[in-house]
Image (cartoon, rainbow, N blue to C red):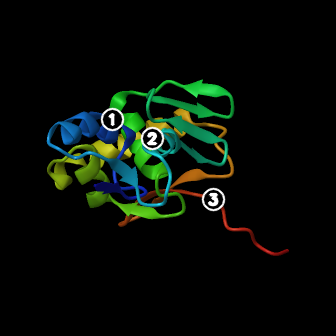
Amino acid sequence: MLHVLPGMASLVTLRTMAPLLLAFGFTRIAPTDGRSFDEALEEAAVLSAGNLRIDVGMFRAFVGERPVELTYLEFELLRLLASKPGRILSYDEIVATIWHGNVTDMRRRLGVMICRLRAKTAGLAPFRIQTVRGRGYGLVAPIATGG
């Protein structure tokens, strides 16, 4: 039996790999938390953070009810940030995940893409795309201050 751990693979990977694994003799593919394979796929199909909703299976994103038009790489970047809300991802981690390439050559391109994502996701609440200079980017909620 192959166990699919939560967050281990994207919906696309699961749907692509399942027939191949079954062809090689795996008779059962199941999540480790007792859910069915279809339930795990359904849950993995939608990411949400605040009023941001990302339909991974259909490659669509929404801020509230408004659809957001994204390029493939913008979608993958937003999906990566939304998959780890509240965490700052390093430049290297983002570039390695999105482009699988040379980190130093992609920092400027990443900065431009973040700027475009901020414009396209205007109205995103309570989360926002935050820059931490010298570190990276994250989808974070503002810290509430007592007053």
Give the residue type at disc 3: Ala
Residue at (66, 61) in percent of width and height: 142
- Tag 3 and tag 2, C-beta contact below 8 Å: no
Quarter occupied by residue 18: top left
Foreground pick, 23 / 4: 23
- Give percent across and percent down for residue 141: 63, 59
Measured from the top left, where is residue 29 in percent x and y?
Answer: 33, 48
- Which residue in the rendered view is the most extreme toward the right? 147
In this picture, is 84 found above or below 105? below
- Secondary structure at badge 1 equals helix
- The mark nearer the N terminus, 1 or 2, is 1
Q: CA distance from mark 3 to mark 2?
A: 27 Å
Which mark lies nearer to you, 3 or 2? 2
Residue that carries the numbered disc 2 in the rendered image: 41
How far across and how far down the image is residue 132, in percent?
45, 64
- Disc 3 secondary structure class: loop
SS at circle 2: helix
Q: Label 2 crowding class (10 Å Cα cut-off): few <14, some 14-19, many 20+?
A: some
- Kindly identify which residue carries mark 1: 15
Crowding around mark 3 (Cα neighbors within 10 Å: few <14, some 14 to 19, many 20+) is: some
Of discs 1 and 3, which sits in the foreground?
A: 1
- At x 22% / y 47%, what residue is drawn? 26
Whichever of labels 1 and 3 marks the residue nearer the N terminus, that label is 1
Q: Amino acid at mark 1?
A: Arg
Q: Determine whether, in the image, residue 96 is placed left or right of residue 67.
A: left
Q: Earlier in the sequence, mark 3 or mark 2?
A: 2
Quadrant of the rendering where the C terminus is positioned = bottom right
Picture quadrant of residue 22: top left
Q: Are marks 1 and 2 in contact (CB under 8 Å)?
A: yes
Residue type (three-letter) at the residue carrying disc 2: Leu
Specify the label residue 141 is tagged with: 3
Of the pair 18 and 107, the residue shown nearer to us: 18
